[in-house]
Amino acid sequence: MTRIQSMTIDPGAGLSVTPQDSDEEDDNDEEQQGDHQLDLHHVNNDDRDGSKPFMTSSYLAAVSPKDHQRRKKRKNNKAMKDISFLRKRTSTLLALTEPESYLSGQQEAPHQQAHLSRGMKINLNTFNFLIDGWAFSGESDACDKAMILLERMEEMYYRYGEDSPVCPDVRSYTKVINALSRSKHRDSANLAEQLLYKMEAMAESGENPSAKPNTFTYTAAIEAQSYSGIKGSPEKAEELLEKMIQKYQSGDPDVVPNARCFNAAISSYAKSALPGAAQHAEYLFERMDGLYMSGVEEAKPNSFNYNSLITAWANCRDQEDENGVCSARKAQEILERMEQCYAAGDESCKPTTVSYNAVIDAYAKSKQEEAAERAEQVLRRMGALYKEGADIQPNTRSFNTVINAWAKSGRADAAEKAQDLLDFMTNLYEDGNAAVRPDAHSFCTVINAFARSNQLTDKAERANNLFRSMMDAYEKDPKMSHLKPNVVAVNAVMNACAYTIQGDINEQNRAMEIAHNLLKILEDSDYGSADQITYGTFLKVCANQMPDCATRQQIMEVIFQNSARDGQVGNLVIQQLRAMGPPELYYRLTGHYIEEDIRMEDLPKEWWVNVVEGRWRKRKHDDHRNN
């Protein structure tokens, strides 16, 4: 392609246009550009800086600890947070290149027009710089802004041809695909794929050879699929990865499959609920390892790839591989393989806290009889390695996951084990280990362990004591916000009250008293509002701890009325009400016969408008509240 001139608009007195050679370093390898820090205040202030192509850490060929630090450094760049400057700069550039701003009736390119006091060069790098800024800005309209800038470049190029000061190149399109990959738009992955295919078509036809996709383009498109989480995205990510491999094996020097693009495809399967997702992830991992063994250095597996594969097995719960090894054990075998590689001197495979936490999570999700015990063994190994000087420190998540594994284990000693771990966390934190600070989730999980126990006769009392310790700590020092009670904690204690072992009238009365006090606490504090779980579980407490009498029916009526008032008549409330009866009370409250199989949608909408059930409904509810 003929090199295109850029234009400089002189901000000084007088109107002058200074043609400059653009794209002076277009052939630079994009990976070299990874260390170039974006500074919005210095773009185009001199010829060299104004002409340098910009590259963000998302284009790095392989994610390694060193590259990760670069990305963190980039993320913390203060100039990137100057959104007002980015918006102003974008508006100025779009105004300068608006066709309507040219002299009426003329077809002159923008660099043949002059503007006073703008101080901006209209060239490829200015556009690419701003697109890059939007791609990593985190703004809700970032994707739209990046697309508008790209479309303006295309418009100028198609209108003026070789006289245009800009011709979008592979970096321009790749940066927009990066913006799409970080977008929350539901169709962003498809748009990214379409843009990739458009680049291929333009390059193959000769329409725009400089738009030929490279490694970074394909990686960004694969990441767009992986991040989207939509139906079919894992298969799409794998399809694009296979295309990369084919291009590389066909001799395309610009497309080399690397650890980063493999990681995006593996992660896509790891996050999916597809049957055989872990097996697909492992196939891709072994494919990557095979390429590396055949001489493709860029495809060398690193700790990020291992962690993604461990997560894939952790998320498939109790599935087995072809040899009958359960998923949790499989996750641990992968961790052991990492340890062996690292021990042999491979620094890129160094296990991290994330690696060990993923294995713990695999055991926590497993229903194997020994799962909780094995999860705790991994936790204790982390602690031992940390004491030996390894950079592997157990954190709050590590402990919380093991506590949860015990809470769900069904073991007779589960509640005691969970309590012991919480006490251990607390002692470590009080001794100065901030990484293991107990939080509300830690306490709630132990409370749930109490509720699930069939051995404890005083579960309601013990659960309430734990809740009170949270409340007292927070009330004494509001800075202890990590221990602020919430409706989840209240519901957990309420559940312990509901399942207090029947037979001891004093225990049953105490369970009712605790449950009633919890409702009052929610009314009188800022811990949150009662939800359908609160009301439904309170009805369960009444059903289990009170005889069927007029008083119980009066309480049922009040609870139902309160839940309707709060828009919290969820299916749990309806189920408990039906189970408790009597039929005439049920009909009077709901307007339906007890024999009818109704759901909350069959009741007036204002009765259930605030109910949040399931992940999908919760996401929709949160999106509605945030808009």
Image (tube, helix red, strand yellow):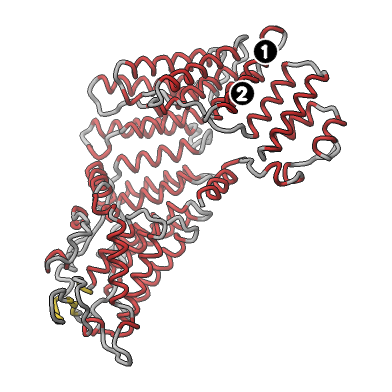
Residue 298 x %, y %: 25, 52
Q: Which residue is mark 1?
A: 501
Viewer-proximal residue among 419 and 101: 101
Instruction: Tell me where residue 613 sits by quadrant.
Output: top right
Give the mark count: 2
Circle 1 or circle 2, nearest the eye? 2
Identify the amino acid type marked 1.
Answer: Ile
Question: If the image is split into quadrants, where does the N terminus sit?
Answer: bottom left
Viewer-proximal residue among 377 and 478: 478
Residue 311 visible in the displayed image: yes
Residue 154 x %, y %: 34, 76
| Outermost residue, bottom side | 105
Q: Secondary structure at mark 2?
A: helix
Q: Secondary structure at mark 1?
A: loop
Identify the amino acid type marked 2.
Answer: Lys
**Which mark is drawn over residue 520?**
2
Residue 388 x %, y %: 24, 20
Residue drawn at x 82%, y 33% as measured from the top left: 586
Residue drawn at x 37%, y 45% as measured from the top left: 286
